[in-house]
Amino acid sequence: MSEPRVVAVIPVRYASTRLPGKPLATIAGRPMVQHVWERTRLAAGVARTIVATDDERIAAAARAFGAEVAMTGAHATGTDRLAEVAERLDADVVLNVQGDLPLVDPAALAACAASFRADPGLGMASLMTPIRDQREFTSPHVVKVVTAGDGTALYFSRSPIPYWRGPCPDGVLGWRHIGLYGYRRSVLLALAAAPRGRLEQAEELEQLRALARGVRIRMIEVDSAPPEVDTAEDLDRVRRLLQGG
């Protein structure tokens, strides 16, 4: 059986309510999207890495540091932008790498890609990390996931799941979902064309569309979640981390 061809796509847009132009924000002398691109290219098993955008400013910056760029139309979600690129890709598996993760772990991306080689029938893969803090566990801004015994997702929620009726025995209250995905290309295109379901509308979580349609999502455990850059404060924190103080 031949190895699946894995292509990573970094969907980025210029507009951001809380931090406009954040893909081009400078961190340690380079735009944020360049950090994401460089780390993604280090992931074993990824044959190609593409920056996907509808903004010529981002495209020009990406080309300047050597990235392959795919221009797209305007889209409401990164998944829709990803699907537009995937339609014209020669790929078996597409990795969706968020453009606001300048500290994304190449090893985690490699593990995501490897899950498709290990399981030819797998439709999707994603990442999770343990939750030990009660405030994190109850926060609606932190997406939680529960899994079956084989490591596939049973459900995702903004609510704290599972509900502990007694004390938690091992300190792991739950599992935080990290929004990095691998898709079998055919699955991605089918999901992008499908309507939003009731669960997806209730939780505002796109991955519930996949579960509702019977798609298996393999959850891969990692030690921690990479910091996301959503605000100016997040950007300052990541700058300190990458600049050593």
Image (cartoon, rainbow, N blue to C red):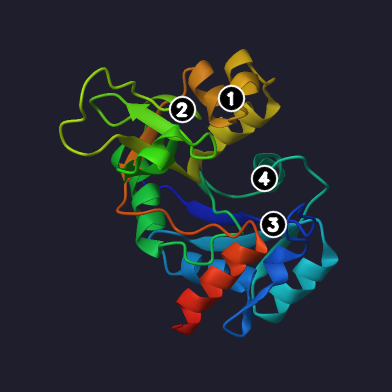
Q: x, y percentage for residue 138?
A: 44, 33
**Location of residue 188 with respect to 233 vertically, above or below:** above
What secondary structure is found at the residue carrying circle 4? helix
Disc 4/disc 2 C-alpha distance (Å): 19 Å
Q: Which is more N-terminal, label 1 or label 2?
A: 2
- Would you say residue 175 is visible in this rendering? yes
Number of residues whose C-alpha sits closer than 10 Å to that of mark 4, classed few (under 14), some (14–19) or many (20 or more): many
Q: Which residue is mark 3?
A: 12
Q: Which residue is mark 2?
A: 156
At 15% from the left and 31% from the top, the residue drawn is: 169
Disc 2/disc 1 C-alpha distance (Å): 9 Å
Q: Amino acid at mark 4?
A: Gly
Tag shown at residue 167: none
Number of residues whose C-alpha sits closer than 10 Å to that of mark 3, classed few (under 14), some (14–19) or many (20 or more): many
Tag shown at residue 78: 4
- Nearest the eye: 154 or 4: 154
Disc 1/disc 3 C-alpha distance (Å): 23 Å
Q: Amino acid at mark 3?
A: Val
Q: Amino acid at mark 2?
A: Phe
Number of residues whose C-alpha sits closer than 10 Å to that of mark 1, classed few (under 14), some (14–19) or many (20 or more): some
Disc 3/disc 2 C-alpha distance (Å): 24 Å
What secondary structure is found at the residue carrying circle 2? strand
Tag shown at residue 203: 1
**Location of residue 32 with respect to 198 vertically, above or below:** below
Disc 1/disc 4 C-alpha distance (Å): 17 Å
